[in-house]
Amino acid sequence: MPRLGSVQQKIPCVFLTEVKEEQSRKRESQQFQVVATENVNPIALESNVESALATEKLDGTCSFVSIYKEQPYLWARLDRKPSKQAYKRFKKHQSTSKSCKGFTWNVEEDFKTVPAAWVPAHRVQHYNGQPIPDDHGHIPGWVPVEKDDKQYCWHSSVVDYDARLGLVLQPSAENEDLLEITVVPLADLLGQTLELIGTNVNGNPYGIGTKKWPVHFLVAHGSVRIRNPPPVDYHELRSWFQDSQEGRVEGIVWHCDDGSLVKLHRHHLGLRWPDGDTLLNARPVVVHVDVMVREYDISSKDLFTSFSELNGHNFLRLQDIKFDP
């Protein structure tokens, strides 16, 4: 079986890309689009992408489980970005040289401050003890999610540090077509990256929960597999995204045997996302959350308690999940 890679860096596209000077379909403020060409990326060919494991690219925010305060903690993605003045110099260099290469950063002076507990992502290159920005001028990294941190309240809603558990959505071991909501010891997730999805993340393309009763989950990267994926061919993949039920996903991430990751997003092919119902929100789901229910005031009832009260329930579709007031 191909090795599941950890999402620590930006993942390259499975095809070579080019920039088109037109309004981005992905970001309203971006006046250009990065689109796929029909040429397979040499990185993908070198990693034997045709034998890779194809998995669903989920639309959320990247998270990571690692040790903090001597116990497993959830970490949120936080890229260290340049100051406005430094970014202007970077963009001027890009415009003049038509390349990101050759620009010199002063990491201590050019970048915004980050929390003291921030750490750079794995495989970020260092020079003289300082992390080096990537081609986009960012230093990918992580910050631990504290229990009462309002900025990361939706992250903290899916972990219980006292019980050392995470709330996870995953395919059932008995039936891959069935999703299950369950609790997993954070120690079992150490070193893994996961996608946080739900009501208040990225516009909620999966229609999960409501504003009154927000619902969020962690989904381990690589856990939602695509069966019978099309070959890595531009036209066959575009037809698959447009015409098949299985293609109602944001994209594909291929996990290669050597640990490399490559991806394809609908936007790379000029296709909308989301575009009607998604494959994930239409899948049936069962709740397997059996935790000791503690004494809570109803106004502060958390997701673990709410799902524990639904333990054993089946829903025809993920988007049908709701809590009784």
Image: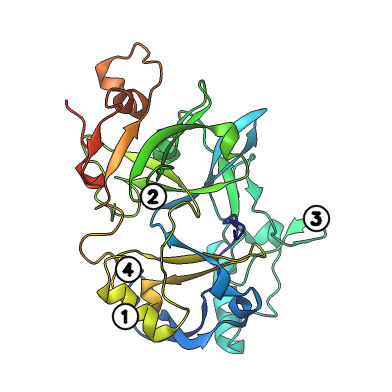
Q: Which residue is mark 1?
A: 239
Report if residue 158 is visible in the image: no
Other residues around mark 1 within 10 Å, as few (<14) / some (14–19) / many (≥20): few
User: Do labels 3 and 2 touch, CB within 8 Å?
Assistant: no
Find numbered disc 1 in the image and state the secondary structure of the residue it sits on.
helix
Find numbered disc 2 in the image and state the secondary structure of the residue it sits on.
loop
Other residues around mark 3 within 10 Å, as few (<14) / some (14–19) / many (≥20): few
Q: Which residue is mark 3?
A: 129
Q: Is the N terminus in the top left, top right, bottom left or bottom right quadrant? A: bottom right
Residues under labels 3 and 4: Cα distance? 44 Å
Say which label, 1 or 4, has the lower sequence index. 1
Say which label, 3 or 4, has the lower sequence index. 3
Q: Which residue is mark 4?
A: 247
User: In the image, what residue type sits under mark 1?
Assistant: Ser
Q: Nearer the viewer, mark 3 or mark 2?
A: 2
Q: Is the C terminus in the top left, top right, bottom left or bottom right quadrant? A: top left
Residues under labels 1 and 2: Cα distance? 24 Å
Q: Is residue 158 left or right of residue 325?
A: right
User: In the image, what residue type sits under mark 3?
Assistant: Gly
Q: Using the image as rendered, state which of residue 115 and residue 317 is in the foreground.
A: 317
User: Where 180 falls versus 135 (above or below)?
Assistant: above
User: Do labels 2 and 4 touch, CB within 8 Å?
Assistant: no
User: In the image, what residue type sits under mark 2?
Assistant: Glu
Find numbered disc 4 in the image and state the secondary structure of the residue it sits on.
loop
User: In the image, what residue type sits under mark 4?
Assistant: Gly
Say which label, 2 or 4, has the lower sequence index. 2
Q: Which residue is mark 2?
A: 176
Other residues around mark 4 within 10 Å, as few (<14) / some (14–19) / many (≥20): many
Residue at the extreme front: 174
Q: Is residue 244 left or right of residue 9?
A: left
